[in-house]
Image (tube, grey):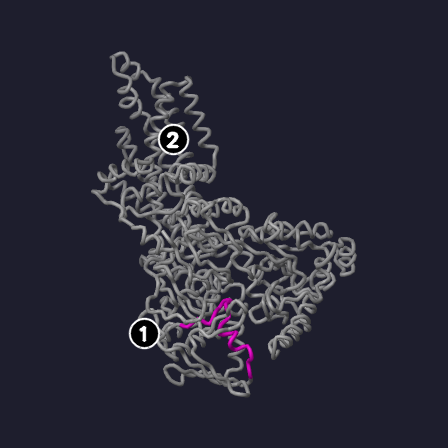
Amino acid sequence: MDRRTVLKGLAGAGGLALTGGLSAPAIGQGAAARTLRFVPQANLANFDPIWGTQYVVRNAAAMVWDTLYGIDSSFQPQRQMVESEEVTDDGTTWTFKLRPGLKFHDGAPVLSKDVVASLTRWAARDPMGLMIKALQQELTAVDDRTFKWVLKQPYPKMLYALGKNNSPCAFIMPERIAQTDPFKQISEYVGSGPLKFAKSEWVPGAKAVFEKFTDYVPRQEKPSWLAGGKQVMVDRVEWVIMPDPATAAAALQNGEIDWWENPIADLVPVLKKNKNISVDIGDPLGNVGSFRMNFLYPPFNDVKARRAVLMALSQEDYMRAIVGDDNSLWKPLPGYFTPDTPLYTEVGGEILKGKRDLDAAKKLLAESGYSGQPVTCLVAQDQPITKAMGDVTADLLKKLGMNVDFVATDWGTVGSRRAQKTPPGQGGWNMFHTWHAGADCVNPAPYTAIRANGDKAWFGWPTSAGTEKEVASWFEAKNLDEEKAAIGRLNKAAIDDVVYAPTGFFLSYTAWRKNVSGVTKGPLPLFWGVSKSA
Amino acid sequence: MLSYILRRIVATLPVMAIVALFVFSLLYIAPGDPAVVIAGDQASPEDVERIRQSLGLDRPFLVQFGSWVWRILHGDLGTSIFTNLPVSAMIGQRLGPTLSLMIVTLLLTIVVAVPLGVVAAWKAGSLIDRVIMGFAVFGFSLPVFVVGYMLAYVFALELEWLPVQGYTPLTQGFWPWLENLILPAIALGCVYIALVARITRAAMLEVLQQDYIRTAKAKGLGQGGILFIHALKNAAVPIVTVIGIGIALLIGGAVVTESVFAIPGLGRLTIDAILRRDYPVIQGIVLLFSFVYVLVNLMIDVTYTLVDPRIRY
């Protein structure tokens, strides 16, 4: 008898008196083995993947709601709910047919009218959806399994848009749910994906439970990211929210959880030493570090000031501040696109390469007319990544001779303040830090941060006619060679105008118990094919 | 007494109203916007504005406040901006873990701290007294999260006696409920035990110097009888006060403890709500906490009359 058994016995005796003999339910080893306990990157605080676009919502939604197409590991859209598609020679009329036997979690069949309603809601919120909507002549259900999208002019990236994995994905919901205003939250979570959401067990901030959907009919192809056969090997997936990384690390070592999505770099050595734990890169597409400068006000309304910052910054300093001494976790990034993806390019990235030239940067800054006015730098201290980058930037700007107004605050405040277009001294700002998922930086379609269309662009409101011209070129490209050429020109134009400052490319780990198998690398945690032994 | 309790309860209403107005105003002027958090990084300013409108956040302060008060008067704490769930249901989900943690910590404190304080006073100036007071200083000085990590490392990771994290409701068994609470209660209780032990010692020392204690000794009463029947009862008022005030400490400490031990209680809900600017949830929790404070103060006052019959209201 071990000490824990003795403790249990003693407490049991006491408990018998206090609770009239209530006892713990016996959870057999088999049942435990069929439940996968997962610690996600963040709290699942809401569950409408169109209304709220946080990555954690997308990740949970990908289990519950299926998509018409799915992007595979070679970035190609593959059929998922769709059985076939046809496009007219002029590229304006797409006719899609659904796979037979698709069912929602409430038992109702998936019909074309559900798809039409879902795509309509998605298109109101998604940047690519908005582009298609602008070209749309009609989107109609032809029969129960066939629907048609008629456009005024071709949209070559149609299948990519329907299968893309960045938020908001084109998830298919029952018509009654999809008819909800896209700016209001849904309250029913019925999908047709491989797992059902157990709403009654949802404790926001603590736990979210997903049960295997036994009526799900997976495709026959091998699974690859959001494409292929999504075979669920466990009965339940429990998301356990743990805000404290040390607690998550201890729980993983103790066997209280099975899989931790993104262990922080500081704790990885401890996990690697544990013989019961596997540690590997989770998302091969990693992240692109970034700080954005406000094009509307001095000093960064002058391209010379922006270039001076690029000329002086050391991506290595930023990356070491984020990931520590593990060199395998980061790469310099003389450009804007995700390394090791088909469109990656370094064209025009010379300013970010080689030895850092502080003197030349100071000279360029002086030429921009900078005369010591405060530079308001917003830094969210509650996000380890932005905090680390903010500290490096403050040091960099001081070395450049800038007068830094360092605003240390939280992400909620940065999120609202960065939307202010007022001057920095009146509630606005000069720069803020963030990062972009590498999956969003593989091409211009999901890449909001690369757009430079002034008032319509992302925060910082960059204007760069060259960048915008090449974004359009990429959308019109007919093959990979044309796409690559357009991206090369785009990268150069964006760096010349410094649409934003890339601070490097970094990866993060994922960790799981060795009795869990089938964990694969991907832009989001993928639960199909993952099994667990006792 | 009953009329006094009723009067006190009625008197809490204006206090809570003032707290509510204060909290609502503070949130209104504080930076940060839930619509921005909801919309995510990809959203345009127009999208954010439409979400603000759909949530009613674009309405004037007085309209928002008035509508909130009206709902409160009808027993409705509102709906969470993020989860779309009723605030009362969310608080209800989280109340059990926090109450459990507080009850276990409180019991642990009373069982450990009061005897320690009594013994320290009884052996004042001795090695035992110095050791106990030394531990009290130690307990005071260590932050909750440091004690928490140390306990988790030793008792969960090394010895594997207890779990690291989580909470199991009492309905699933006494031991599953208790085993999740032992380490957090010790971590949270350290400061509290130290505080109560020191106050108990001080109060006991004062009482032990009174004439009636000398008389009791002269009559040949045993040491235990003198300490626990005569002295402790007369020293109880400050001890009860500090235990009551300590409940406020527990609520504050629970925020950290619940994070360290991943307990889904009100402390974590509060932090999550503040970081996301989930106004209805923050307002609901603050109202609840205000009520608890007022109630605890009332209970302390009532307890005075039980431990000291000379006190009358």
Residue A362 location in percent, x, y?
A: 76, 55
**Relative depth, front residue between B148 and B142:** B148
CA gap, disc 2 to disc 1?
62 Å
Boundaries of the magenta span: A154-172
**Relative depth, front residue between A275 and A162:** A275
**Relative depth, front residue between B266 and B262:** B262
Q: Is residue B127 left or right of residue A312?
A: left
A407 in magenta: no
Residue A109, quarter of the rendered image: bottom left
Residue A69 location in percent, x, y?
A: 47, 73
Q: Which residue is mark 2?
A: B196
Q: Which residue is mark 1?
A: A108
Residue at the outermost left position? A20
Mark 2 and mark 1 on one chain: no
Q: Main secondary structure of the magenta part?
A: loop
Residue A111 location in percent, x, y?
A: 37, 78
Q: Is residue A425 visible?
A: no
